[in-house]
Image (cartoon, rainbow, N blue to C red):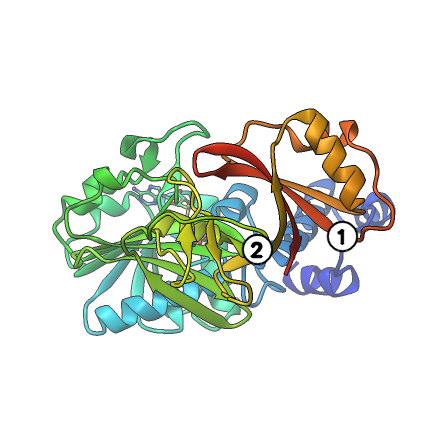
Amino acid sequence: MNSELRELRLAHPRPEQLMALGQRLRRQHSSEQAIWLLQQLEMYWDAMRLQAFRQPLELYYEAQALQMGSRWPLAERRALELAQRYPELRLLEIGAGIGGDSLELSRTRSFRAVEQDEVRRGYLEHNLRVCGFAEVDVLGGDGLEQVADAQVIYADPARRNAKGRQWHDLMPNPADLWNLALPCCLKLSPGLDESQLPAGCDLDYVSHLGVCKEATVWTPGRGRVRACLYRENDWLMAERREAPLLGPLEPGMWLHEPDPAAIRAQVWEPLQGWRIDETLALLATPSGTVSAWTQAFEVLEIADADRKNLIRLQKKWDFQPLEIKKRGFDVEPEELRRKLPRGDGGGAGVLYLTRVGGRHRAVICRRV
Ligand SMILES: C[S@@+](CC[C@H](N)C(=O)[O-])C[C@H]1O[C@@H](n2cnc3c(N)ncnc32)[C@H](O)[C@@H]1O
């Protein structure tokens, strides 16, 4: 089955209609096997799209575990930091899923992994084996009962349901892990409530492909909060600092919209920037201030944001395509777009609806 799955994925590397392929597989296999192969093929396409694994070709996937799993560059960074912080200590990974983190940890150290779900555990063992890490000790059962000779813990708890936002909605419960009083690294949702974290922990907000994917909590720590941004084999990092002062936004300046991890971590990059509204993370700078942390927009005009004025502005600037963005402004961009005239000769432009100094404003700009 293994080599057949490999051949199938090589022959069908990108999403396509499965009807004809399904019929062929059903002629060659039991219907159960054919369904498994097709599901594995589709999940491989997902894994490729999500950049979930470094070597996705021969892995076995399970739908939920794949969606919950770490993206490999993020798992790699965490594994390297674990190796740097605790090079000598015996590591236990509790709740390894199908191996998003285990495969990267394997590259840096020896460790034990526990996964309570039997199917995922079988797939985890397979995935470790085909990637050359068969020596990792994989255990079943409840990881919290297998901490006896662990010296450092890594866990990426699963949400019990889509709505849960409390620690006890997570499996394993982070509070139970912190109560072990061992050094611990936890991958949690970036939407966490910082006031609920152990005092003095280190906290990394991490983004991947423009989305803040996770918050990594290190205990014990020194109370450091960082934003970590992955860009093509490279990491940008910056630490939390005091919010900069408020200042004006005027035509000719650049308006900066920070990466979501930078917003959560409050790193306030670029350092030369000032805030344009005390409720927002948007910054302004003189023109020409480039930052890898932000998308920048050259401000052309700032005006009232009532409907009549927005129509007038779009007639004047004639943007096509017109991008509508909003921050701290209650508007439905697609609904608004239908009410504005379609532009023609003005080129690409941005209508940025936001607050400036406490007032709702329409900021006309172009992407830098
Ligand atoms: C979010 S997934 C882990 C994903 C993994 N880090 C990856 O990147 O592929 C969490 C896993 O923890 C397992 N789990 C939850 N509580 C556990 C416990 N007490 N002991 C062992 N496994 C547990 C769940 O079955 C689930 O597969």
Q: 10 Å neighbourhood of mark 2: few (<14), some, or many (≥20)?
A: many
Say left or right for 143 vs 319.
Answer: left
> Residue 185 at x, y = what percent?
27, 55
Quarter of the view holding residue 362: top right
The residue wearing badge 1 is 348
Give 261 or 182, whichever is nearer the viewer: 261
Quarter of the figure with the N terminus: bottom right
Q: Image point 16% across, 56% down: which residue?
A: 220
Q: Image point 76% across, 39% down: which residue?
A: 314
Quarter of the figure with the C terminus: bottom right
Mark carried by residue 60? 2
Q: Name the kind of residue labelled 1 in the image.
A: Ala
Q: Name the kind of residue labelled 2 in the image.
A: Tyr
**Element type at mark 2:** loop
Q: Nearer the viewer, mark 1 or mark 2?
A: 1
> Residue 174 at x, y = what percent?
25, 42
Residue 66's place in the image compared with 339, above or below, is: below
The CB of the residue at mark 2 lies under 8 Å from ligand 1 = no
Quarter of the view holding residue 176: top left
> Residue 291 at x, y = what percent?
49, 65
Say left or right for 107 vs 109.
Answer: right
Q: Image point 37% across, 40% down: which residue?
A: 278
> Residue 288 at x, y = what percent?
55, 67
